[in-house]
Image (cartoon, rainbow, N blue to C red):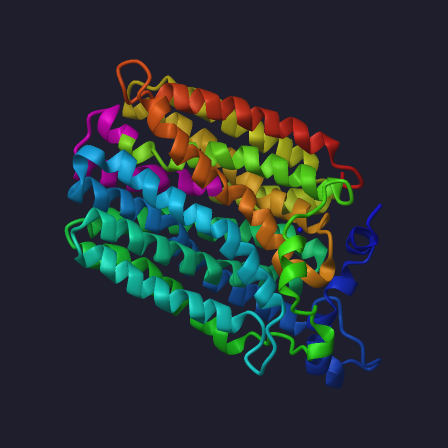
Amino acid sequence: MGDPTVQIMETAPSQVMEPAEQAARGATAATSPSGTAPKQPVSIKRTMALVLIAALGMYIMSLTLGTALSLRLAAVDPTSKETSYGMAVSISSLLLLVTIPLTGALSDRTAGRFGRRRPWIIGGLVPALLAAAVIGTVPSTPVIVAAYVVALVSAQAAFNAYAVIPIEALPDNKRARVMGAMGMAGALAMSAGSYLAAWLVDAPLLMMCVPVLLALVCSIPLLVLYKDPAKTRAELPPLDLKGLAKSFLVDPRKHPNFAWAWVSRFLAGIAMTALFAYFIFFLMDGLGMPIAEAGKSAGLLTLISAPVSILFFTASGWLSDKMGRRKPFVIGAALLMATALVIGATATSFEQFVVAWIVFAMGQAMYLTVDLALCAAVLPDARDTGKDMAVFSLALSIPNIIVPAAAPAILAIGSGHNYGFLWFAAAALCAMGSITVTFIKGVR
């Protein structure tokens, strides 16, 4: 998330929270003698709870679709699974370059009695569910690739609309710990999703659809109970498509802090994509596991790392808020992920890969928790939070284009299946990302 908006967000986060605080005052004025909101309005606590309930389902969907696709393609197209997977991920990620900021900006500009975020959450989850059903029923690689593109783009639109809520509805001194709790839900969701995919590998329709259904069910309390602050047309940014297209390109000269934060996340995103997109194929090709065993091992990996992720999601968010520091946590997290990739690149047994996975889980949990709080402090325009957060999320989407496109050539080096070279290169870039964080000014 020398710009005046950034200064407002750094020194007076309550101004960013104005819509949520107004709703809270309406709920608590009767019990407050002065008619002002207490430090912890009831609506803030309720919003935190609703966000965390939805997080479990949203993360299961987001973290399971890729694993399910890998297993589905390994069964339908075993000889060309890497190429087919890379095509599906690259095409969908390329479309996300446009659809993520566009849906974020349109979400900011949505007016109506259902609020700004709710229509986009529902409107994304329903087509994602339909596309997932196609993947699970049609044994054709081109159809699976096309349906996955629709599923991922739709699911991402829903997730992005959801992810704006904790940014705009919670004060700055609560964001990192809530992000940490969301990350904790993500850690649990990744483990549950991996086991779910492995358990349902022989029932592809359920394997593809259940994650999206869980996202829909877990989002119902948020959709029903969250009071998305109503906005009049005058309060919303104007819908100027030409200007909107230009605004997607944030000028790094005007907003250097945001640019450096984006670059850092982009380089870390390459590391995350390189590991998570290919670890199941590494288990099959590098360690010689059959499809079913690889699926179960993926679930075991996430189960083993879940307590570590939970600890680091929770502790890093709490410590970052308590110390008022963001950059040291982000730098340390990037270096941990780089170290884990080196360990994974040299692994010759499942036990060695478990070590790499745990170390990566430590770094990723810390990174995703504090990096979002860092972004929230350097957003270019508080009125365009949805669009700017969507632009920031592109830093994790673009690697999904670059890595799968480059990976087949990298993996083919030598005798083939050269995951070691792929992960060494990703580790070097991730370490470079830790350096770019030091260039961010005005944030400790």
- Quadrant the C terminus occupies: top right
Residue 401 belongs to magenta span: no
Residue 208, image x and y in percent? 27, 56
Q: Which residue appears at 75% of the width and 82% of the height?
A: 29
Q: Magenta segment range?
A: 282-309
Q: Please, which residue is most extreme toward the bottom here?
A: 30
Q: Please, which residue is most extreme toward the top here?
A: 414
Viewer can see residue 144: yes
Left/right placement of residue 230 relative to residue 354 reads right
Residue 207, image x and y in percent? 24, 55
Residue 232, image x and y in percent? 69, 80
Q: Which residue appears at 34% of the width and 61% of the height?
A: 212
Residue 296 belongs to magenta span: yes
Viewer can see residue 219: no
**Image: 60 above or below 110:** above
* Image quadrant in which you'd find residue 58: bottom left
* Image quadrant in which you'd find residue 434: top right
**Image: 278 above or below 21:** above
Q: In front: 327, or 52? A: 327
* Dominant secondary-structure state across the stretch colored magenta: helix
Left/right placement of residue 387 relative to residue 363 reads right
Q: Which residue appears at 39% of the width and 42% of the height?
A: 90
Q: Please, which residue is most extreme toward the front here?
A: 242
| Number of marks | 0
Residue 392, image x and y in percent? 60, 48
Q: Which residue appears at 54% of the width and 79% of the height?
A: 114
**Image: 357 above or below 313:** above
Q: In front: 144, or 17? A: 144
**Image: 433 above or below 349:** below
